[in-house]
Image: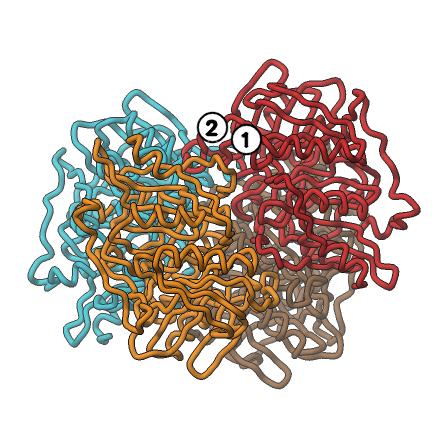
Chain colours: A orange, B brown, C cyan, D red
Amino acid sequence: MTAQVESMVRRVETPEFDIMRAAYAELVVTDLAASERFYVDMLGLVVTHRGDDVLYLRGWEERTHHSLVLRVGAEPYAERLGFRTRSNDDLELIEAEFERRGCVTRWVDGDLLGMGRALRVWDPFGVPLEFFHDIELHETQLQRFDLQRGAPIMRLDHFNLHSAQVEKTMAFWQDLGFRCTEYISTDGDDERITGGWLCRKPTVHDLALTAGRGPRLHHLGFYVAEPPGVLRCCDQLAAGGYAPTIERGPGRHGVSNAFFVYLRDPDGHRIELYACDYYTGDPDHEPIRWSVSDIRCRSFWGAQAPDRWYDESTLLMGPDGTTTTVLDPNVDERTSRSEVMA
Amino acid sequence: MTAQVESMVRRVETPEFDIMRAAYAELVVTDLAASERFYVDMLGLVVTHRGDDVLYLRGWEERTHHSLVLRVGAEPYAERLGFRTRSNDDLELIEAEFERRGCVTRWVDGDLLGMGRALRVWDPFGVPLEFFHDIELHETQLQRFDLQRGAPIMRLDHFNLHSAQVEKTMAFWQDLGFRCTEYISTDGDDERITGGWLCRKPTVHDLALTAGRGPRLHHLGFYVAEPPGVLRCCDQLAAGGYAPTIERGPGRHGVSNAFFVYLRDPDGHRIELYACDYYTGDPDHEPIRWSVSDIRCRSFWGAQAPDRWYDESTLLMGPDGTTTTVLDPNVDERTSRSEVMA
Amino acid sequence: MTAQVESMVRRVETPEFDIMRAAYAELVVTDLAASERFYVDMLGLVVTHRGDDVLYLRGWEERTHHSLVLRVGAEPYAERLGFRTRSNDDLELIEAEFERRGCVTRWVDGDLLGMGRALRVWDPFGVPLEFFHDIELHETQLQRFDLQRGAPIMRLDHFNLHSAQVEKTMAFWQDLGFRCTEYISTDGDDERITGGWLCRKPTVHDLALTAGRGPRLHHLGFYVAEPPGVLRCCDQLAAGGYAPTIERGPGRHGVSNAFFVYLRDPDGHRIELYACDYYTGDPDHEPIRWSVSDIRCRSFWGAQAPDRWYDESTLLMGPDGTTTTVLDPNVDERTSRSEVMA
Amino acid sequence: MTAQVESMVRRVETPEFDIMRAAYAELVVTDLAASERFYVDMLGLVVTHRGDDVLYLRGWEERTHHSLVLRVGAEPYAERLGFRTRSNDDLELIEAEFERRGCVTRWVDGDLLGMGRALRVWDPFGVPLEFFHDIELHETQLQRFDLQRGAPIMRLDHFNLHSAQVEKTMAFWQDLGFRCTEYISTDGDDERITGGWLCRKPTVHDLALTAGRGPRLHHLGFYVAEPPGVLRCCDQLAAGGYAPTIERGPGRHGVSNAFFVYLRDPDGHRIELYACDYYTGDPDHEPIRWSVSDIRCRSFWGAQAPDRWYDESTLLMGPDGTTTTVLDPNVDERTSRSEVMA
């Protein structure tokens, strides 16, 4: 690897605020009943609240009110990606950081059930984020083995974004205190980063960046307890008539060591069921480099992913009520198609 | 091992009739609703038929009408142990065999739902058996992964009897065409068999004999698809308030290689969930000997079983409407307590 | 399904001889050391005997001398597919059956280590078979958990043949006493069988037929104890540099309920690791029909198999020392390409 | 629960220093070759360095030089329990804290291979601790699936101490910034804490306290990837003649949700293999209370632990070269035997 990329991926910033972890996503879906059948009946997420036009869901071990909010709308898109901060006081510091960058920021209060004051912002690339601390706590279902069904989805783990500017976007998240755990880069002297995995909690990631037309939400990653749970989920989906929702896998990623399967929900939103994470909390934890030409980084066992896994993604809602403009990986980034296809 | 025991366990008879396999048991229970909660809600058996005082159940891969019949009665006992024959014509040959031995035999027809003509007999030791061929076939639930819940109980596998006369009882079943796959015997010149595993289908057993006060039904063995299914079942039972039903294990038997757990149903009937069987179908398959002093035969990992696992069993119904007389392992059999405790 | 196909698949013959099960294959490989690294170091098969130009291997629970014989040669092909008979006397009866059909038959004695007299025949389609009873027995490694490594391959399970004449070939094997457990057929009035699974032992198959250019050996199927063993094997192969040997899967077949992965050995011979079989031993076990247009029969979860999985296969050695002529599925069989691609 | 205990377990302190996690233990063993067979050959730990009288080991995903140091000595005991700090500068702050309490403190430098400067201290109860930041980093073996064998031990997870003064000891560790995730307490108005689980990294624990004669090391907890890995380990141990090392389990703890097995190494040091942890990183994560009378807290499935699991533990080395004095749970703590036996 080149010294330049090495210094880029190793950069560690410690801002004054403390973003703890990826916490929830709000997705807009076109048929709430169809979404409930998929996420609740088939995948087994726990319903915290069911409203006329909204569903609040959480994983088996989660205590916070929701990690996935599904709201009915005319077109599918992602409304926001929520991160929990260590304290309420972090929010003003984050607001200042985003205002300094000229980003749109908005305070909301009780915008979602179970939540209090929260800070919505659109990052410099147009991604709709929300930062919050206050959220209602609920009982975990971790040991209610008698109630559990579907896949053993323990918790929301991470967001994966399609980005047309991977290196700049990675630098931005590093400024917010995220640390790079693994990355993919091109070979040769003109090394460029085409994929990055960034964490706050001590796992492989809270946020990952994949080179491609963006910004778009590539997928939501849910942590499942063990690989057999992923297999069981595939069997249940197929038996229930949902085989077409299985887009890629099951398989092993070299990057992150994930035992994965990718599903497309009834609106095409992509989710990953993800097992086999590892501890990354020590501050001298070295980022692992994967060459873009090494097929094992994306598929340790060598299986090809379908094109749509690389091409398709969920649009993001902008501050003006229309979805964010999507850019092609630009010339300055010099990320060729073959690199994107890593 | 002594030559005498070696010739005993290796004996292979080929009677004219063909008993295919252990097929079903009928148990009398005192509270059918409680039994349904245990066997259906917790363990996940499939209901073929639910009557006022009877429940017909089968495993996920089973196609025959039932492998477990639960009938309400004042006291718990085992009504009969059913074996399926290859053809209907086998039944007369079996009748002749039992009459030759002076056993009680009775023809029944439509005695149970889904069945036709069947031959009830009480074997020379007082065990209530039934032989039959005709039984209604149903759809398998093997690939209805969306409906499956509870433990992955695939099928009834075997009956295990407490016997006061293990060697004589083993010889009797060998006469019926059963072959010994594994056995436990005492050490020294006066070697005696204290446990025997006998099969017709090419697995470790359809019938096992355990030295002890008998004849009684020690347990029904159900085959589960894989060890994690046994663990999941324990978690579900405990979460549902059924932890006290878990009597022994999970663990590994040396004998049969079973990954097992033993449960006691609401009436105290014992069932085994059993994974990790192996193929025994070749005619020169050698019986495996275990010394009664080798703790690994009963508990490969060394854990002690509770006394009640050795002492308690289900009584059997006799031909006269009272339960069969239970004998202590008799002096002629010279099976001491320590041997029984294998 | 049409009455004609229904009567075809339900046909049960009981010849005088008793072929018990698929027992071993002999494959010719070009680099024995490379094959040993693959089959022994990576997959974990047990070495019974290692010679200068031959390797005798068996699975963890197998007691017979070998289930896979690898012999060095200039070109890879399959030398023979061995079936074990219940007794030695079956061999003459089988010889008569093949001579009646005008097939080449040959007696060999001690042709392979650990074996005695055996009958080699080439079936009417050119497949090199061997029938035998006598074979040396060895200790099982089933409970030598401390020695086990690689995949938990328990035993050879079945042979899968590419056949240009599936219906005729199925009828031939039914004449030998094999029973159809599952099959794939075309839709409509002119229903044709394009795949058949046939057993002698009470599992889904000892022999399967896949429509395609044949006769060729599509794959050897090895039974593994549980799905996680298949995953572990993929991880080990990939970590050892063998990812390119993983051709298809892991995944679930609808047919047979197999949790599978297909591998190509260093010479391109295909093997399947196969878990999740079920009991088929009752004589009224109904064959399961799958429509050729139902993607779930081949891939329950919907993933596409690569073309080479359908097209490529191992050539078979003929009686004259040259490999058997391969035919395209002929016009009389009216099996179109799309049907073959089931 | 009483308000008093509630406030005790909920206390959160944020000292100026940052102890990141339990990092390694040094145990004295009497036969290094025997220990290597147990920890390396059977359990599969990775050898970082093998010296004449010392062995440095780490788990599959660990990058730091060692998580277990085994050193030869005349009698078995625990030499020290090491915690890693976020930075080197934390060490002086920790030194001040312990000196303020009148504890023995000592600086060492290069005392162990792969390490630099470190602070040894004996806590107020006599437990030998070490705090350090600098440690050599090594390659992970996480994806060297081809090299892995034994149990899938990923990393050292926690220390469990037998303590005669659970409440005071818990308060001490809370002062150091540890947070209580779960605890066991007596019922009634005079509620007393008899067990506590305390963490720094966001898992259930880095340190646990069990009421009993202490201070002693009850066990080292190693995190394994998944429950089947625990089963495989038991099978391997038993097959290798190590069944007597399996002391308790496998089973499920209610507390911590651990799927566990407890082993005794050749010197009697106890280790736990531990799967199924959960995320505890949010600052408002509520401690879970278990009643001492609820058998499920220690054994979710209800199995009894042997007495020696409660009674026996490893002695700790004091600052003067003799092992620490062990106290009975004292009268002030009013922890009766029955409470200890929780």
Query: Which secondary structure, mark 2?
Result: loop
- Disc 2 marks a residue whose amino acid type is His
Compared with D73, B32 (above or below) is below
- Disc 1 marks a residue whose amino acid type is Arg
Q: Nearer the viewer, residue B160 or A74?
A: A74
Please say if the residues under marks 2 and 1 sit with CB atoms less than 8 Å apart: yes
Compared with D306, D46 (above or below) is above
Mark 2 — residue?
D138
- Evaluate whether residue C225 shows in this view: no
Residue C220 image point, x, y percent? 30, 45
Task: Kindly indicate the quadrant of the structure image that contains residue D146.
Answer: top left
Q: How many marks?
A: 2
Mark 1 — residue?
D58
Please identify the quadrant where the C terminus of chain B is shown: top right
Residue at (76%, 21%) from the top-left corner?
D75
Q: Nearer the viewer, residue D246 or B255?
A: D246
Q: Judge left or right: residue B209 versus residue A156.
A: right
Please identify the quadrant where the N terminus of chain B is shown: top right
